[in-house]
Image (cartoon, rainbow, N blue to C red):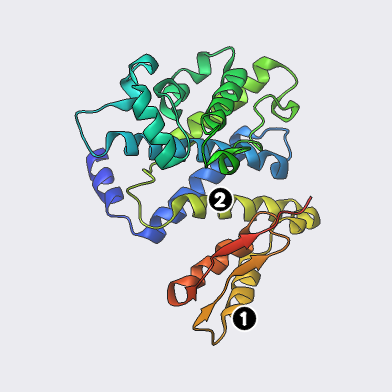
Amino acid sequence: MQEKNKKRGAKMTGQQQVEALQRQIWQIANKVRGAVDGWDFKQFVLGALFYRFISENFTNYIEGGDDGINYAGMSDTGVPDEAKIDAIKTKGYFIYPSQLFENVVRNASKNDSLNTDLAEIFSAIEASASGYPSEEDISGLFADFDTTSTRLGSTVKQKNERLAEVLKGVEELPLKFDENEGDLFGDAYEFLISNYAANAGKSGGEFFTPTHVSKLIAKLAMHKQTSVNKIYDPAAGSGSLLLQAKEEFDTHIIEDGLFGQATT
């Protein structure tokens, strides 16, 4: 029966994948947030998703489709300096094997210094771009994923327990970011942000434009246009408007791309 379910899962359509992912992500969020306000807690779920995404993405780059290479199983000292430099020039950052999501989550529930270890890993990933053209883009990459925040708990033990649950929940999501149809990471982000905004009431509306409103604005902006110079959102917030606008770009030419300015 399990084998049949696996096969059936492998044939899921893009929309079915999105819906299944959404259900499981919301279950994770509801299970681990506890007394933490949903709108405040979204950053930890999204941060864990992003951490897994870039870890898998980086591993796929290093291995290059070679089944004989197991980057996660390598020692940090076994990575040649030239490989690190090439990776930073190409990807914009570097992640050592020990810093990968899959290696951190493996012992997360037993790691008494999980929160500070994660903070050091995120800082190291950002610092890897120092002195390279990508430095400005990578700086602050994990700024919203504050693993030492009191929102996770008043004690280190509470922080670590909640972080371990988030990481484990994200690990169990049945997806490989490079194999699934569509932009599942983007879908997960938008789903979480919209649901947290809805549950936050009026305050959520300050950060997230409802999907149907974003779609309407995007369609109006692109109406009868065969090409535009750029799309700009002066109050980007969560970026939901730009995400929806991007969906309209498949049939239009955007010469200079997307731009957003976050509000403070």
Q: Is residue 173 visible from the viewing direction of this image?
A: no
x and y, in percent, of residue 42 in the image: 64, 42
Q: Nearer the viewer, residue 4 or 128?
A: 128
User: Residue visible at 50% across and 35% down?
Assistant: 51
Q: Nearer the viewer, residue 78 or 71?
A: 78
Whether label 1 touches label 2, CB < 8 Å: no
- Say which quarter of the image contains residue 239: bottom right
Q: Quadrant of residue 121?
A: top right
Q: Secondary structure at mark 1?
A: helix
Is 10 situated left or right of 106 in this image? left
Amino acid bearing label 1: Leu
The front one of 27 and 140 is 140
- The quadrant in which the N terminus is found is top left
Residue ID for mark 2: 189
* Residue on which the image places disc 1: 220
Residue 56 seen anywhere in this rendered image of the structure: yes
Q: Earlier in the sequence, mark 1 or mark 2?
A: 2
